[in-house]
Image (cartoon, rainbow, N blue to C red):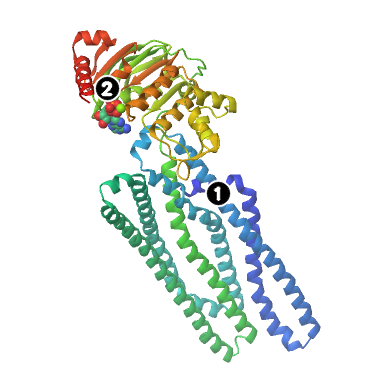
Amino acid sequence: MIRRFFTYYRPHRRLFIIDFSCAVIVAALELAFPLAVQHFIDTLLPSGNWNAIVGVSIGLLLLYIVSTLLQFIVNYWGHKLGINIETDMRQELFQHVQRQSFRFFDNTKTGHIMSRITNDLFDLGELAHHGPEDLFIAVMTFVGAFWIMLTINVKLALTAMIIAPFLVWLISYANKKMNAAWKNMYSDIADVNARVEDSVAGVRVVQSFTNEEFEIERFTKNNRKFRLAKLAAYKVMSFSSSGMYMSTRMMVLIVLVYGAWLNFTGNLSHGEMVGFVLYVNVLFKPIDKISAILELYPKGMAGFKRFTELMDQQLDVVDKHDAIEVPHLRGDISFRDVTFSYDEHKPVLEGIDLDIHHGETVAFVGPSGAGKTTICSLIPRFYDVSGGGIYIDGIDIRDITKKSLRSQIGIVQQDVFLFTGTLRENIAYGSLGASQEEIKDAAKRAHLEDFIASLPDGYETQIGERGLKLSGGQKQRIAIARMFLKNPPILILDEATSALDTETERIIQEALSELAKDRTTLVIAHRLATIRNADRIVVVTEDGIAEEGSHEELIEQDGIFANLYKVQYETSLSN
Ligand code: ADP
Ligand code: MG
């Protein structure tokens, strides 16, 4: 774990070396200053040589200035190092999450991902900076100060150290407790995030059921749990820092009393006594530092552990190493004995065989939950089949790079996701390099032109959270405009118009028909009247493909489809 942590220093090793060396020099100077004071009292003071005192003082002044400059470097560049490492990790994690498959997102809460990418890494940056540097300096100062104390007076130094075993126990005890406490705290704050994300995303549902109180209660529970976890951590921390305070003060007391005795008996000069007390103070610094690291280390490492857990999450839909680029697919799709399940014990699709020819429009109908969406999401490899295979133009889709496969499949769904940004940016999402002309053309073909012309800011209108709110039909047309830009040979329309009223649907249908021209099109439709003109209709039920044929053929067959159609037709008449 630690070794892996250190690999993140590699790109910043120059910064690390500069920071570390400056810190070592600062620590060495800190060690030397009390010796100067001791020398000052014991030799310079009795000599009465004013010039020497001025000379030594100027020397000290210069050293203080150097030390101050170095401390600035250590502080600023050290933090820079920490921030760089934190930023690198965040970047790496985001990239890793972007590459995850749908299956990962099915099983992971957004709030948990957010937590790991944001606050879990905050303390890591601090640890990256302070951890190795402070630990090294603490050890160096401690050993140095103790060694000098030994040279001043062995007996006094050893006596002062009777506190040491207690300190060692305290440090290891606090470390163990704190590890557990921070780990709990991180997972509890992730739960708080997940709750917030749920209740904000679902606020319409919450309020329509007037379940605000219920949500508040659930949140309170998570929030309290977080409070307890954090409190537990600070309890251990307070205990250990009080313990450290107590032991260091005891040390001073021992030095004062025993030192005074040695001074009376002529075994310790005044200067040595002062020097000694100053060194005890130098000794405290590493102890303080170590107690700060004791707080930082488990905190940062708990964050790092959560970071690695997510980084180690295997990608499950990946390119084969010899996957091929296929820049121009014709769009012949075949399913061969395809089996698929989201989780092992419950197969969703079994033995699906299906051939779709390029340019053909095939409609999928059937009860909800039958697997229509699932069939369509296997084509762009949002999930990989569990058995059998899917072929486009005769090539197994697992042999094609995901990028070239997906760039040639367009999907329009019922929910259109719009990004925060302008209308133009949202349309251009279909093809990031699109020119203004191309965007305008796409908008025109998606029947968006008049709407955009009616807006004061036109294409530059902000949409999303702090901008214009769009109706379902308008969003749908943006999705269609994206498709005109993307211009894929294969098109999937998954209930694209199901949420719209009949009038809006009629307008959008025109745009969709134009979009479907010269493309292999798979349409999942709820309203059967909209797919009358499909080349073929496939009826999907829980048992697989039940019927297949043109509208007329299926009506003639008088099976499932004919029945569904009759029911819908009659309802539409009675309306
Ligand atoms: P349809 O589009 O025909 O309404 P779906 O393809 O969405 O049906 O769903 C088929 C079955 O797979 C349903 O039983 C549904 O509960 C299940 N299912 C759909 N999506 C997921 C998913 N992401 N994880 C687990 N099960 C799913
Ligand atoms: Mg569906």
Residue 341 visible in this rendered orientation of the protein: no
Point out the tag, 2 or 1, that comes first from the N-terminus: 1
Q: Quadrant of residue 358?
A: top left
The image shows residue 310, relative to residue 136, as above or below, that is above
- Which image quarter holds the C terminus? top left
Residue lying at the far right in this picture: please name it: 51
* Position of residue 279 measured from the top left corner of the image (x, y, whole percent): 59, 76
Q: At x 49% / y 54%, what residue is drawn? A: 122
Residue 507, how many percent across, how many down? 40, 23
Name the residue that disc number 1 marks.
85
Q: Residue at x 58, y 56 (%)?
A: 79
Question: What residue is rendered at 52% in x and 17% in y?
Answer: 327
Residue linked to disc 2? 349
Residue drawn at x 50%, y 78% as measured from the top left: 160
Give the left or right position of residue 382, taking residue 426 as reference: left
- The one nearer the camera, 341 or 528, is 528
- Label 2 sits on a secondary structure element that is strand
| Residue depth check, mark 2 versus mark 1: number of the one nearer the observer | 2
> Which quadrant of the picture is home to ligand 2?
top left
Q: Position of residue 103 (x, y in %)?
A: 36, 33
